Amino acid sequence: MNSFLRIVVLLLLASPNSGFLLAMPGMAQQPAPYRLTLQDAIQKALEANLTVLTAGTRVEEAEGTRMRRLSAALLPRVSAQTYANVQNRDLRAFGISLPGTPEVVGPFSNYDLRVYAQQNLVDLESYRGLKASERAVDAGKMNERDARDLIVRAIAALYLNAQSALARADAAQSRVTDSSTLLRLAKDKHDTGTATGVDVLRAEVQLANDRQALLIAQNQYQQSQLELARNLGLSPAKPLELAEPLNYYPLKQPEIETLVPAALAARADYLSLLAQRQGLVEQQRANRARALPRLSVNGNFGEIGRSLGGVQGTGLVQGQIDFTLFDRDRNGEAQELASRVKRLDDQIADLRRGIDEDLREALLNLNSAAEEVTVAQDGQELARRELQLAQDRFQSGTANNVEVITAQDELARAEENYILAVSSHVDAKFALARAMGETEKNIVEFMGNP
């Protein structure tokens, strides 16, 4: 009896309808899908994207350049040197020729151990060059932020594409369910003699069309997952599951008068150009400082002697002033820098107008998409009511299923219009987040459920 109960329990657990599946030897286990939120997708993309990684290394390189300029020109330089030698000297080579003295003296030896130090006290050219390198570091950081913003915008668009594809697949599955219900109803009515064979055939054709549309929608959804996984640095073999379906969340539109100044203060690409301009201004100041004197102090201290036991301490301290009397190259460098500043001024002005345009365009699209969503929602509701009325008429026998199939097609168009409208609204949010700067923060805020 116990063996019989054990067999019954095992059969129940192995049944597909039981909700359990026994792992049999050799049975392939499907990996659990990874539930991916939009914020997770953004973080994974930022960790894996080559553009962001490259921008980070450029910041490190600029920081290294700044440290080199600081140490080479403004920090003290200290070195040590020691030697021991044995030599002889040809006195005649030095103009010494005395009666009774040998022509060559030596060999003799001496030892020297010495520490040298040098410090620039006043060097405006090097100081301005250091400031220019600091602005280059700031520009590099802004370029890295801008690269991150661009990747965030691109990944958000890919996630939205997958959301839209999933919504279309769900809508296609719903249409298959409705068509299957219609076919069963047509067959039942045909069996009772209240419907014709044409009604059954028409329902079968509709079901076949909807099944084909479902296969296409599912394939497009799988392709969008593959593209998303590729850009996140994930294996294409790992199944994904979107944790956030496509939904409509209205967004209160901010005033353009307040958006533009805030965007100019937050847009990394604009701030990068400003930092680059400040760096060029520092280089212009360094160029002018080339004509100014430079003051430095240097010295050494050590011990020297004929033998290690007879060394004596000696040293030197001296101040030094360097003047540049003729430097034609400075004029050419000044012209180069002036041209680069003018070019950057033009770029800054153009980007300022572009940011203003991006903000206004995003607000227009956001407002238009919100109105489209409202209209699409009304159209969806009307299409559902039309389908319900057509189904009731066919059920009661007052009409054939042509009206039902027509209503199903109308509902399919209404659902597609709604998906397009919501997708446009979400994309307009992403565009506004990018135009405002701090794209990741704004996208997370805009997509939150109010």
Image (cartoon, helix red, strand yellow):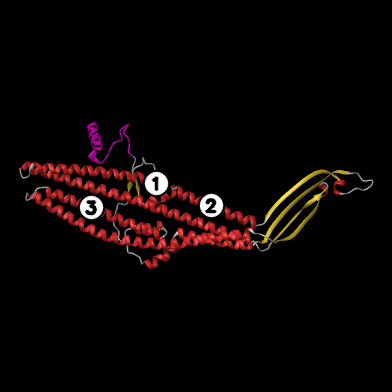
What label sits on residue 415 in the rendered view?
Answer: 3
Q: Judge from the rendering whether residue 154 lies leftward or rightward of residue 409; answer left or right.
A: right
Residue 2 inside the magenta-drawn segment: yes
- The reply to whether discs 2 and 1 touch (Cβ–Cβ < 8 Å) is no
Instruction: Name the residue at the right extreme.
Output: 100
Q: Judge from the rendering whether residue 158 lies leftward or rightward of residue 412; answer left or right.
A: right
Q: Judge from the rendering whether residue 7 lies leftward or rightward of residue 194; answer left or right.
A: right
Q: Residues within 10 Å of mark 1 (few under 14, many from 20)?
A: some
Q: Amino acid at mark 1?
A: Asn
Q: Residues within 10 Å of mark 2 (few under 14, many from 20)?
A: some
- The reply to whether discs 1 and 3 touch (Cβ–Cβ < 8 Å) is no
In primary-sequence order, the first of circles 1 and 3 is 1
Q: Position of residue 198 (x, y in %)?
A: 10, 42
In primary-sequence order, the first of circles 2 and 3 is 2
Instruction: Name the residue at the left extreme.
Output: 193
Q: Which residues are magenta?
A: 1-30
Q: Is residue 37 visible?
A: no
Residue 405 inside the magenta-drawn segment: no
Q: Residue at x 31, y 43 (%)?
A: 222
Q: Calculate the distance from the C-alpha at mark 2 to the C-alpha at mark 3.
A: 50 Å
Q: Position of residue 30 (x, y in %)?
A: 32, 38
Q: Secondary structure at mark 3?
A: helix
Q: Position of residue 379 (x, y in %)?
A: 20, 57
> What residue sits right under mark 2 in the picture?
60
User: Which quadrant, please, contains the N terminus?
Assistant: top left
Q: Calculate the distance from the C-alpha at mark 1 to the C-alpha at mark 3.
A: 29 Å
Q: Residue at x 37, y 62 (%)?
A: 359
What label sits on residue 309 in the rendered view?
Answer: none
Q: Position of residue 254 (x, y in %)?
A: 35, 65
> What residue sits right under mark 1 in the picture?
231
Q: Amino acid at mark 3?
A: Glu
Most foreground residue, 184 or 198: 198
